[in-house]
Amino acid sequence: MAPELATHTGKDGKGIRITEPAMKQLAALMQQQGNDKLLRVGVRSGGCSGMSYTMDFIDSAAILSDDELYVYEPSGAPSFRVVSDPKSLLYIYGMQLDFSSALIGGGFNFTNPNASQTCGCGSSFAV
């Protein structure tokens, strides 16, 4: 059995659980994006299992009035914000975001307790 990874939630204790490797990668990516950027995480219809995950950097001006906003404070790196729409949160609440630098299967990985099935690539799921 794999060891449990340390995870972080938003400053308020809510939001997507993010592992330490993913926190470091996101903090580095946020610095490259420049000021006033956020990470939007959500889902959309499509993918081989019915729904697929989305992640994109957006401007603060693109936050919608009903979006949920979470602030993450990684140790030794600047804080960053993650935003998600209410519809996506229904499907990804409790999800864990991890990052691997492995040559095969590397990148961001989603572990979603709400998914009844996932595809081999890990980027789409069904509920």
Image (tube, rainbow, N blue to C red):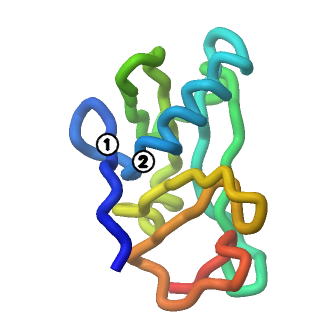
Residue at (71% x, 41% y) in the render: 56
The local secondary structure at tag 1 comes to: loop
Amino acid of disc 1: Thr
Task: Find the residue positioned furthest to the top.
Answer: 35
Residue position for label 2:
18
Amino acid of disc 2: Ile
Residue 33 location in percent, x, y?
A: 73, 20
Residue nearer the viewer, 114 or 77: 77
Rendered view: 116 above or below 16? below
What label sits on residue 63 in the rendered view? none
Callout 1 touching callout 2 (CB < 8 Å): yes
Q: Quadrant of the N terminus?
A: bottom left
| Quarter residue 107 falls in | bottom right
Task: Find the residue positioned furthest to the left.
Answer: 13
Rendered view: 4 above or below 35? below
Residue nearer the viewer, 27 or 124: 27
Residue at (46% x, 18% y) in the render: 77
Residue at (67% x, 48% y) in the render: 55
| Quarter residue 27 falls in | top right
- Left-right relation of 102 to 18: right
Residue position for label 1:
9
